[in-house]
Amino acid sequence: MQDKPARGGARGKLRAHFLANLGRVMDSDELRAVADNQSEWARGVRELRTEEGYLILTHNDRSELKPGQYLLESAKPQPAFARAISKETRAFVLDRNGFTCQMCGAVAGEPHPYDTTRKTRLHLGHVIDKSMGGTDDAANLRAICSVCNQGASNATLTRPDLQKILVQVRRATAADQLEVLKWLMTKFPQQAKSHLLTKP
Ligand SMILES: [Zn+2]
C-alpha cells in the first residue's frame, strides 16, 4: 500500500507534463502514469481546465482527437473572467440562452451540427468585447459553443435580426419550413397548444 499523494500533487505533475508537451496529443494511459495514481488523474485534468483555465482539448473540442486523447496547445490559461464568473451567473446565462450556442444554434450535449462526431460544449462569451468596454455582467454574456469559440475572432458575432430570419424561413422549401415548425413546437409546447386551441 502506498500513501495518498499530497493534495494537488497529481494536478501539479499533470500541469508540468502538459506544459512540457504543448501541441502533442497524449492519451489517458500516459496521463495516468504521470499522475502516479489510478484515480486522481482524471480529476487533475478536470481541475486544470475548470480551476486553472487551461484549454485542454478533447474529442469534444476537436474532431481529430479520439476519445481518451488530450491536447494542450497554449500555455496561456483562459482569461480570468471565464473562471471568475460565478456558477449562478453561468447557469443563469446558459438557461436564458436555452443551452444553445447563440451563433450557430448548437445545443449543449447534442452532436454539433457542423461536425456530428463532436458533442456540443458551451462556453460563456461576451456580447460586447472586454476591449470595447464590455462587462462580465450576465447582460453582456452569452452561450457560445467550442466550435464557434475557436473561430470567434474572425466570425460575425451579430445574431441575425428577426427580419432576416423571417426572410430566410419564407424563402425555404415547404419541407424545411415544416422542420422549423416542428422544432418550434418542440421548443414551445405550451404556446403551440394554446395557439391551436384558440384558432377556429
Ligand atoms: Zn456555435
Image (cartoon, rainbow, N blue to C red):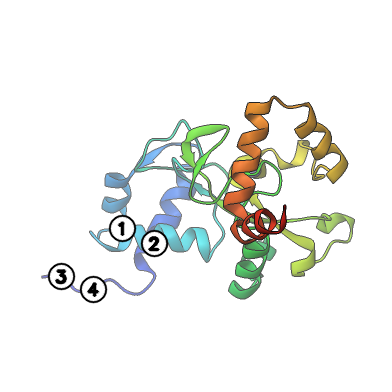
- Quadrant location, the N terminus: bottom left
Label 3 beta carbon less than 8 Å to ligand 1: no
Callout 2, which amino acid? Gly
Q: CA distance from mark 2 to mark 1?
A: 8 Å
* Residue at the spot of label 1: 35
* Image coordinates for residue 60, horizontal then vertical, percent: 47, 43
Q: CA distance from mark 4 to mark 1?
A: 12 Å
Determine the quadrant in which ligand 1 lies: top right
Instruction: Give the mark nearer the N terminus: 4 vs 1.
Output: 4
User: Quadrant of the rendered structure where residue 129 is?
Assistant: bottom right
Judge whether 136 appears above or below 109 on screen. Answer: below
- Label 1 SS: loop
Graded by Cα atoms within 10 Å as few (under 14), some (14 to 19) or many (20 or more), the crowding at tag 4 reads few
- Label 3 SS: loop
The tally of labels here is 4
Q: Name the side, left or right, on which 103 lies relative to 108.
A: right
Label 2 beta carbon less than 8 Å to ligand 1: no
Query: Which of label 2 and label 1 is nearer to you?
Result: 2
Q: Are marks 2 and 1 in contact (CB under 8 Å)?
A: yes
* Residue at the spot of label 4: 4
Instruction: Give the mark nearer the N terminus: 3 vs 2.
Output: 3
Q: Name the side, left or right, on which 57 lies relative to 103.
A: left
Q: Nearer the viewer, residue 17 or 138?
A: 138
Name, please, the residue furthest toward the front. 200
Q: Are marks 3 and 2 in contact (CB under 8 Å)?
A: no
Q: Residue at x 36, y 40 (%)?
A: 67
* Residue at the spot of label 3: 2
User: Quadrant of the rendered structure where residue 126 is?
Assistant: bottom right
Q: Residue at x 67, y 41 (%)?
A: 104
* Residue at the spot of label 2: 44
User: Quadrant of the rendered structure where residue 15 is?
Assistant: bottom left
